[in-house]
Image (spheres, rainbow, N blue to C red):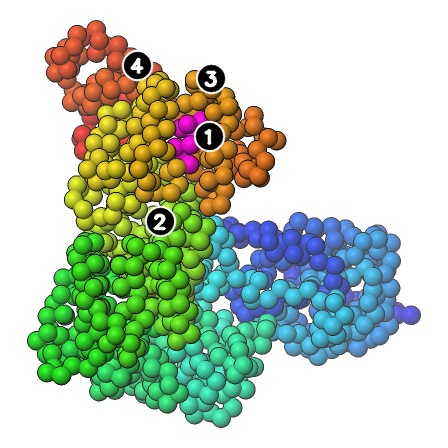
Amino acid sequence: MIDHDISPRRRVPRTKVTIPDPPVDLVSRPRLLSVLDEAEQTMVFVGAPAGYGKTVLLADWAGRRRDTVAWVSADAEDDDRLFWSAVLEAFVGCAGIPAGNPMRSLAVPAAPGTDLAFLATIADALDAVDEPVLLVVDGAQEITDPGTWRGLQALLRHQPSGLRLVISSRREPPLPLVRARVAGQLLEVGVNRLRFSPEEAGTLVGTTGPGIPPHQVGLLVARTGGWPAGLRLAAASAARQGNLADFFAGRDRAVLDYLTDEVLAPLTAPQQDLLRAIGICDEVPAGLAAALSDRPDAEAMLRELGEPAGQVVHSVGIPARHRLPPLLRTYLRAELLRRAPERTRSLHAAAARWFAEHDLPAAALLHSVRSGNTTRVGELLRRHAVALFLAGEHNVLRLALAVLGDRRAVTSPLLALISAALHLERGEPSSAETQLSCAEVAWPGEPTAELTVLRQLVRSRLAQVDRGPAQAVRAAEQIDEHLASDTGLSGLATLHRIGTLTARRDRASAREALSRVADAAENANHHFLMTQCLVTLSVLAGSDGDYREMGKLARRVQARHAAHDPHRSLEGAQVSAQLALGSLLRGDAAACVEHAKQIGRMLGDAPARAARTLGLLSEALRGAAEFELGGWHSGLRRMRRARTRLGTGRSFSTEHAAWCTVLEHRAALRLGAADQAREVFRWAQPIIAGSGELLLMRARTQLRLGRQGAASSVLRSLSEEDAPMLLPWAGIEASLIGVRAALAAGARERAVRSLDEALRAAEPGDVRFPFVFAPSDVITFLTARLGKLGAGERFAGQVLAQRRELRTPPMPAPLTERERNVLRLLPTQRSIDEIAQDLTVSPNTVKTHVRGIYAKLDVRSRRDAVATALRRGLLDTEVGDFTG
């Protein structure tokens, strides 16, 4: 029995046993809260370094269940008695501890952590509660008194049914975690779970002001590793500087101070020095740390720094490869360069030697560049440039060529050709031609097979990028595959010839051959060659109507691109175009808009013809998606701008032209813009002559005019005439036009056949677009047919569910052509009489049209009509300010 009067409790500050208030910019994390809520384990360990939001997460969780939570914030000043006084004070403040419970009057002995009677009393008191109480010990790394840990260990041995212990710490506490793991009684929430997802980061960034644009959130998550404190530091840096330039470059002093005080300060001096040494590398293979730090125990130190709770170093694989958190690495590297530039160069030189000895040329070249050793850079380029180009190490090659300088690089035909090839992948044909000319000037009398084939490939790629289809075919024909077979360029030579020649005649054989090249490239770690094959295969799959395969291949390439940080590239833009096409066909207009925006970011200001065509296609797709999301007028205007900028030549494929025209014509008719629909058709006629898409647009127009019989007649001719579809999915659209025409004519059986035909064609490729955004009469008919669709039942249900989720407002009544003509003159401040004179109609007719415009735009004045029309995209933004 304890004499409670002998050792009263120590006075405990109220804040020590109070659940902290949430920060103003709290980002609640339901995915983690649900993990904590659903856990049944007796112990929870939330372990991670500083800044991972351990306290915020637990406070958010505890705040939702205050009646059963006892909170204790550990401090470095805590001795054994103060800690246990705080524990009892926290229990007393918990509503889950009833009034008569012994803990409410229990005194704290002189050495509570080793007083077994005292600890047994707490355990018995907890056994008596109706519902388990959560004892949260936050910041447990601050506890230094061994007696405190012995007391917690003893309490856990008692296993009171009314206790769940929740520990947060920057390192593993001296508790029986291993035994708890084996028994399944430990829930661990570590670094990987605590990282912010892109969605959570977007929420955080959204609360901090406009300094970080949404498209940079993904990059920010990658650079910070999802570290919550890093994201907050980035937001603060952007608020101070207006952008993230200083943050990404390691120049923000506030970030450096935080990392120094919170991450590095708890480490020993040798540990800090080791981190600075390996910080020059993005990844540190086993053995390199010892070479850089001159410490034989480097691997053991890194394993210690990689323990799950602290995880200052992330290690994977056997033998281990080590990485520092991206933000810490950036700032260590920048600080070392500022304070000890000579040591920085010597470390890079040592790393270059180590990587070269271990046959890792990309890393060896990169560190040679950073060490400033141009002699070593030149040697590595001459030996490995072609292999590195095929491997996709383009950024490293660009850095190396820049270090050598123009004069040294262009005297080597090999390096000039590699430079030309790199420019082409950025969509810079003029620079590529300059480098190609330099290669010709320095051309040797007896070139090697590799050099000859490389020149042929550069010429072929130049034609693909900037010369148009006809010249691309001619250039591909000049590639000597027999000569290439004895070089490392044979796969790329096959790709060029298949991509431009064979695919036009025998796509099945082309796809089979490309798959073989891609597999061989993957085995040889030729990332660039493999992704080029996958991009071509994705394009071919889309042309064949295999849209599922198209999307699968494009997503595979996108994942590899993300890993290689491609910056601007034609390849990346082409992949984004395939993803945009696939998203639109699946009826996911919002995703289509995002992929289309990504195309613009990938292309930048690339002047190549291929880049221009891709950019305009992306604008057409974005316009079509925006139209379906409710931006009817602005979307239609975006499509028109893209099409007119394509021009009327043949510098783009007929397939691209078909995409642009089918989508714009469809939108124009739906919005009542008959003039624009006619303009689209006239533009398309000479470019896609003889195609099924032209007949599709004719049928659509006849149906819009109320001529159901004529529309059905055109559709019959579509199946009877030799008018192949350039876009396989357009046949589904034609079938749905047939449904509408049949319904309007009262031919229900024909409508049933057309609907079944559309479903059969759409389901294999998951083509939902024509259904999800179909007119209401088609949706009503499809809904009425549920239960009678056979194999199409499941797909129809998915389409209807997706349509129900749309939040698009109803389309406004379209303006007539006369009303549009009047609207265009409203900003000019002409009077009604003057407008009537310009349009050669009576003033009363103009007044009627103006009343119609006001009603359809829901406005009451001329000024409001102009403002609303500008906002909806009905007027050019160049009309100027309206002041009349």
Residue kind at label 2, given as amino acid type: Ser
Nearer the camera: disc 1 or disc 4: 1
Are there few (<14), some (14-19), or many (20+) residues within 10 Å of tag 1?
Answer: many
Q: Are marks 1 and 2 in contact (CB under 8 Å)?
A: no
Residue kind at label 1, given as amino acid type: Ser
* Vertical position of residue 321 compared to residue 589: above or below: below
What secondary structure prevails in the magenta region?
A: helix
Disc number at residue 852?
4
Residue position marked by numbered label 1 in the rendering: 754
* Vertical position of residue 287 compared to residue 177: above or below: below
Alpha-carbon distance for marks 2 and 3? 36 Å
**For residue 186, side relative to residue 424 (left or right):** right
Residue kind at label 3, given as amino acid type: Gly
Pinpoint residue 128: horizontal percent, then vertical percent: 87, 58
Disc number at residue 746?
3
Pinpoint residue 738: horizontal percent, then vertical percent: 41, 27
Q: Are marks 1 and 3 in contact (CB under 8 Å)?
A: no
Of marks 4 and 2, which one's residue comes earlier in the chain? Answer: 2
Nearer the camera: disc 1 or disc 2: 1
The quadrant the N terminus occupies is bottom right
